[in-house]
Image (cartoon, helix red, strand yellow):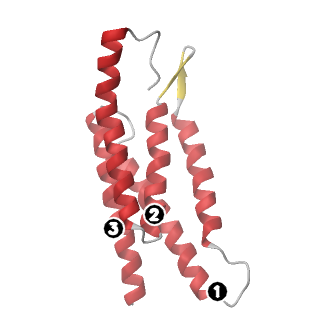
Amino acid sequence: MGVENEFVWRLVVATLLGALFGLERSLAGKHAGMRTYAMVSMGSALFVCLGTLASFQLSMFAGINPLQIAGSIVIGVGFMGYGLAGFRGEHPVELTTASGIWVVAGIGMAAGFGLFGLAIAATVLGILVFSLFARLEHRLRARFGSGGNAVE
């Protein structure tokens, strides 16, 4: 039961970090918010944990590799992001939200592998990119002009 508790902790960390990441999106009025980000992060961690546990249990068989599951998550969440992003006329929209979903999947994978420092660092950096960089972009556009519609 001790090993399983470690993996439960990994899910909890991934879920909380994903929710924290999504909080900024919720506050920015985006469709994908805390729940979406928490679920993507936790789901990614869950698949990584399952792959890791399965590789322990099936270690007598060659070819079991939890990184194959991680690679599939990257592709699957990429398709999810593609579905989120769209066009308003000729201009792409929601690319920032889609990229955030993709990053939060990586945060979940890092937590799933037990790399908590990396998961926390990515969460902090992602929130900084979403919040501080958004303010910087708006100030620069106001000062120098947008040169067209901004990609969001």
Question: What x and y, as percent, mark residue 97?
Answer: 43, 37
Name which residue type carries label 1: Leu
Indicate which disc residue 110 carries.
2
Residue 67, percent across and down? 61, 67
Disc 2: CA contacts within 10 A as few (<14), some (14-19) or many (>=20): many
Which residue bears the numbered disc 3?
12
Tell me the mark number nearer the camera, choosing from 2 and 1: 2
The residue positioned farthest toward the left in the image shown: 27
| Amino acid marked by disc 2 | Ala
Q: Which amino acid does label 3 sit on?
A: Val
| CA distance for labels 3 and 2 | 12 Å
**Disc 2 and disc 1: Cα gap in Å?**
22 Å
- Image quadrant in which the C terminus is located: top left
Q: From what the image shows, is residue 29 above or below residue 73?
A: above
Asked which secondary structure carries label 1, the reply is loop
Assess disc 1: are there few (<14), some (14-19) or many (≥20) residues with their C-alpha within 10 Å of its C-alpha. Answer: few
Q: Find residue 18 and report its horizontal and vertical position in percent.
A: 36, 54
Quadrant for the N terminus in the image: bottom left
State the residue position of label 1. Answer: 58
Q: Looking at the image, tell me whether mark 2 or mark 1 is earlier in sequence order.
A: 1
From this viewpoint, which residue is outermost toward the right? 62
Whole-number angstrom distance, CA of label 1 to CA of label 3: 25 Å
Q: Residues within 10 Å of mark 3 (few under 14, many from 20)?
A: some
What is the quadrant of residue 13 in the picture? bottom left
Q: Eyeballing the image, is 141 above or below 73?
A: above
Q: Which of marks 3 and 2 is nearer the N terminus?
A: 3
Mark 3 or 2: the one toward you: 2
**Label 3: element kind:** helix
